[in-house]
């Protein structure tokens, strides 16, 4: 039974947590009311995920107390958290990829009879929950075959199946399309209306404005304050988060493209390995030095395959790719790097970092075979360390043990900043930037946008692939819209509008059609 006299369903008082070289949480206080959506806001590495991991039993606090319904509780592990009605959707989903959606949802709380798994009742219950909350899934689909959006719905259904009443969402929109984000906002409102209490970690201030009632701000591991969202401007929230005023609309001088085309693509086609359907369909474009060209589109329309083809991660079926006058269509990744191409990948864990390497080892991945990083076949760890420490300072990569920190232990935002530092630190001639600001706070986004514009103004060619309309419109010079693998529009960014872009991205308008 809940204590109806207790306003707060969860209270965390004086929470302190130390890791080697860093205090992640320093005397933090957070109180969650029943049936509210409460946002937890802070820049990368502010201690948000650590605090929620303590509430979910993944870490034990060094100091502090947790109350549920006004009574102290001990949360030794996630099973204890689930027993208290606490569930969590992690920033990087905790799913078994070769299991079905249904198997992932019931895992750990399976019904058995005579030692055999009984799924009929579980299937009915999962289908009923999915219909009730608008969480459309295919119970029999393997996780490895479904979209990121459906994987997230599976994670939410895992919590609901366990009848959790306190739901933690850690950066839930970082990997979603704008359409999926809109769906998630509705789902969260429906859950709160049903009486669920939600803790919502995000860097996106407009999302907090959409759904949250109150917001607790963390900065460098400490509580800055808790405020009512309706009474607080986005500008004030951002200033509390990063400790300074943030420029949301950058002043962008006009591009001055050079005559030299640094990246050229001719009639590029990439087909599906499964059914030979063109995922990139006869695409041609060029990027000159001194301009930012953006590929805009709804996720799943060929952007990933295009980026992988350009950077050598996947073979092409037809067409040609050139860096300057040199054809690189079938060149290896290293050959492209040596010709001046850098790549900020969409998936930082699979393609961006070796998670069990240190930061300094990851920073040297493109250079370890060259002088001065190696001499006579032996690595110079002093050179690697100095190189990494310089990049970490320049790009504000925060790590408890400095450059010796394992990449796995960095926060998601600092992992992203480490990749950006490696790929932009030496000012490549050509930068393929895929979702470069995904998972970054507003201060880091502002900084990365300024770095991209500075690289442009130094004559570099930048191909930006982004799902964020604000980002597309703020820093691009030209925009190609991709829909079902083909370009549907080529727009001047200075004249394009979000509404116009949205129509092209949804495939409801073709270039040249009347408005």
Image (spheres, helix red, strand yellow):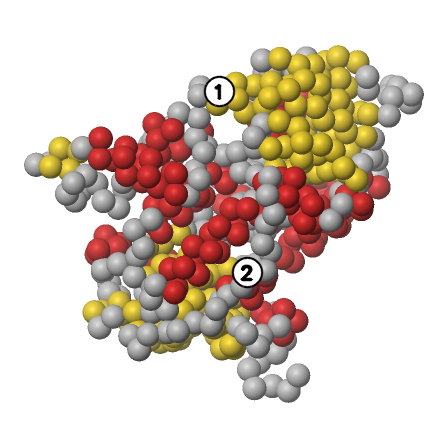
Q: Is residue 482 left or right of residue 12?
A: left
Of 43 and 9, the residue lying toward us: 43
Circles 1, 2 touching at the beta carbon (< 8 Å)? no
Report the residue marked by disc 1: 19
**Residue 322 marker:** none
Q: Is residue 196 above or below residue 345?
A: above
Residue 70 x %, y %: 81, 17
Residue beneath disc 2: 250
Res. 179 image quadrant: bottom right
Give the residue drawn at x 27%, y 35%: 386
- The image quarter in which residue 3 lies: top right
Give the answer, above or below, for where 191 lies relative to 298.
above
Image location (x, y in percent) of residue 396: 44, 40
Quadrant of the image occupied by residue 511: bottom right
Label 1 vs label 2: CA separation? 37 Å
Q: Is residue 490 left or right of residue 259?
A: right
Q: Which of the two discs, 1 and 2, labels the residue nearer the N terminus?
A: 1
| Residue 354 x, y percent position in the rendering | 35, 37
**Badge 1 local density, few (<14 within 10 Å), some, or many (20+)?**
few
Q: Report if residue 115 is visible in the image.
A: no
Q: Hey, which residue is sitting farthest front in the picture?
A: 244
Quarter of the rendering occupied by the N terminus: top right
The residue drawn where x is 22% and y is 30% is 382
**Which element type, helix, strand or loop, lies under badge 2?**
loop
Horizontal side of 101 relative to 449 (left or right) equals: right
């Amino acid at each position: 039974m809940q204590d109806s006299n207790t306003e707060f369903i969860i209270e965390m008082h004086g929470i302190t947590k130390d890791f080697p070289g860093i205090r992640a949480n320093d005397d933090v206080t957070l109180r969650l009311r029943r049936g509210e959506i409460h946002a937890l806001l802070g820049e990368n590495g502010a201690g948000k995920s650590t605090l929620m991991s303590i509430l979910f039993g993944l870490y034990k606090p060094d100091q502090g107390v947790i109350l549920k319904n006004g009574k102290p509780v001990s949360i030794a592990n996630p099973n204890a958290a689930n027993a208290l009605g606490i569930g969590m959707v992690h920033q990087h989903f905790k799913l078994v990829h070769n299991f079905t959606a249904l198997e992932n949802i019931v895992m750990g709380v399976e019904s058995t009879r005579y030692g055999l798994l009984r799924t009929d009742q579980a299937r009915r219950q999962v289908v009923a929950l999915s219909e009730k909350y608008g969480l459309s899934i295919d119970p029999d689909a393997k996780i490895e075959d479904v979209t990121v959006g459906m994987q997230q719905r599976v994670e939410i259904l895992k919590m609901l199946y366990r009848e959790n009443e306190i739901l933690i969402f850690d950066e839930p929109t970082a990997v979603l399309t704008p359409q999926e984000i809109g769906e998630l906002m509705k789902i969260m409102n429906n859950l709160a209306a049903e009486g669920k209490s939600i803790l919502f970690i995000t860097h996106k201030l407009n999302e907090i404005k959409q759904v949250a009632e109150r917001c607790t701000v963390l900065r460098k591991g400490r509580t800055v304050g808790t405020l009512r969202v309706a009474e607080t401007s986005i500008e004030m929230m951002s200033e509390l988060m990063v400790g300074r005023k943030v420029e949301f609309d950058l002043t962008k001088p006009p591009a001055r493209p050079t005559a030299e085309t640094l990246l050229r693509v001719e009639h590029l086609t990439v087909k599906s390995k499964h059914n030979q359907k063109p995922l990139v369909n006869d695409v041609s474009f060029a990027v000159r030095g001194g301009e930012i060209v953006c590929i805009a589109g709804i996720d799943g329309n060929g952007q990933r395959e295009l980026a992988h083809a350009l950077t050598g991660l996947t073979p092409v079926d037809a067409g040609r790719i050139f860096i300057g006058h040199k054809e690189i269509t079938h060149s290896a990744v290293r050959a492209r790097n040596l010709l001046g191409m850098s790549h900020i990948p969409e998936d930082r864990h699979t393609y961006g970092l070796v998670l069990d390497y240190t930061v300094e080892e990851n920073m040297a991945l493109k250079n370890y075979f060259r002088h001065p990083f190696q001499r006579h076949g032996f690595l110079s760890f002093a050179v690697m360390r100095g190189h990494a420490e310089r990049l970490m300072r320049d790009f504000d990569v925060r790590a408890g043990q400095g450059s010796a920190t394992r990449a796995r232990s960095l926060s998601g935002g600092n992992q992203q900043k480490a990749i950006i530092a490696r790929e932009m630190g030496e000012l490549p001639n050509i930068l393929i930037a895929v979702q470069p600001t995904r998972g970054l706070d507003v201060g880091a986004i502002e900084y990365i946008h300024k770095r991209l514009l500075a690289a442009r103004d130094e004559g570099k060619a930048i191909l930006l692939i982004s799902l964020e309309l604000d980002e597309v419109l703020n820093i691009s010079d030209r925009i190609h819209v991709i829909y079902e693998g083909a370009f549907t529009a080529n727009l001047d960014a200075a004249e394009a509008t979000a509404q116009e872009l949205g129509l092209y991205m949804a495939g409801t308008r073709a270039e040249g059609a009347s408005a």
